[in-house]
Amino acid sequence: MKILDRYIIVKYLSTFFFCLLLMTAIVVVVDISEHTDDFVKSKLSAWQIFNDYYLGFIPRIDAMLFPLFIFISVIFFTSKMAGRSEIVAILSSGVSFRRFLLPYVVAGSLLSLFLWAGYQYVVPRANKKWGDFEKRYVDVNKGQNVNTSYVTNLYFKVDSNTYANIKGYDTVSKMGNGIYVQRFSNNAMTGSLKSLSFNWDTAHTKWKLNTVVQRKLLPLGEELTRNDTLLMNYNFRPIDLRKDDYLKDQMSTPELNDFIKKETMRGSENLSSLLVEKHNRDAIPISVLILTIIGAVLASRKVRGGSGMHLALGVILSFLYILFSRFSVVFATKGSFSPWLAAWLPNIVFALLALYLYKKAPK
């Protein structure tokens, strides 16, 4: 690594982390002002609020704004270099423009890998901490008297030959009432099971059914079996019965992949949003590298407006990227747009823009 590489990488990382800390502090202050009433009503200490809420909120919001922080940081320190004619001196010394961009690519790749690892494991845990606090202390203060943890009329495919219907289930207490399971073979029912109530048995990691009636269809009649309690090892777990907006964000990538497989088998209507979340965890970190290159190319040219002009252009491009990304997600979850394409289309478009700007940049 040469002096030039170290200089640019140190500038890159120091500016980025300063911007990250500054913006995080601003966002936290704004959030505190918005949730003061909720914090007071929760009757929690300052340490409990920090541990139960902000240790989840801060990683969540930083991951969300990570590409924007990268873009603004690159444009800021590169435009300062251009304003001091440092880039002109570097290129005049015989360094090619491609070689000049190399430390940007290296630092951008490291931060992209860092964000990717965070999205796989760290951010889902933070989302769970934040989501649990929201449901317990914030959502209840919005004037909604409806128990949002209780879901009704669930009907899904347990396996290739078995279907289940649940009358009602509480996702917090993990207790339900009215479960009816049907088994089929060659398009004909072979048996059924009916239970008045059920709950998740954590000791045996199985479903405990109460007041159970099992019906087995035979060629010349039927066979009935009654049980007061019965432990069943169905292939769905309490997390599979949750249908809230926080669920997909709170699962690590291996858990999300396993959940997608089960939802695909059951023909879930929420499959598109799950697939978009899965692909976004790979696509968003790549956007860090793409926006790094765009920012470096745009800000490397000395203009009369200085860094202010570069920052204004950067904010506009960042807004367009976020807008483009949101539109793609909406079309995928509400329409027939491919989830993979919805996650990667903004990157594809901005990668082409990066290539165009690189070709047009003064060498």
Image: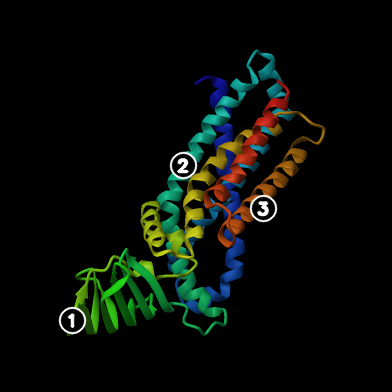
Contact between labelled residues 3 and 1, with CB atoms less than 8 Å apart: no
Picture quadrant where residue 96 is located: top right
Residue 314: quadrant of the picture: top right
Q: Nearer the viewer, mark 2 or mark 1?
A: 1
Front disc: 2 or 3: 3
Q: Is residue 125 visible?
A: yes
* Viewer-nearest residue: 240 or 37: 240
* Circle 1 Cα neighbour tier, 10 Å, few/some/many (<14 / 14–19 / ≥20): few
Residue receiving disc 1 = 220
CA gap between label 2 and label 1 equals 65 Å
Q: Amino acid at mark 2?
A: Phe
The kind of secondary structure element at disc 1 is loop
Three-letter amino acid code at the position of disc 3: Leu
The residue beneath circle 3 is 323
- Could you say whether the residue bearing mark 2 is in a helix, strand or loop? helix
Task: Tell me the element at label 3.
Answer: helix
Which of the two labelled residues, at mark 1 and mark 3, occupies the earlier sequence position?
1
Vertical comparison of 268 with 43: above or below: above
Left or right: 292, with 248 as reference point: right
- Quarter of the image for the C terminus: give it: top right
Residue 112: image location, x then y, percent = 50, 40
**Residue flagged by tag 1: what amino acid is it?**
Leu
Task: Identify the mark nearer the N-term, 2 or 1.
Answer: 2
Q: Residues within 10 Å of mark 2 (few under 14, many from 20)?
A: few
Residues at circles 2 and 3 in contact by the CB criterion of under 8 Å: no
Q: Farthest residue toward the right?
A: 304
Q: Which mark is residue 114?
A: 2
What scheme was used to colour the molecule?
Answer: rainbow
Q: Left or right? Give the position of 296 relative to 194.
A: right
Label at residue 183: none
Q: Could you say where residue 13 lies in the image, as x and y percent from the top left?
A: 55, 37
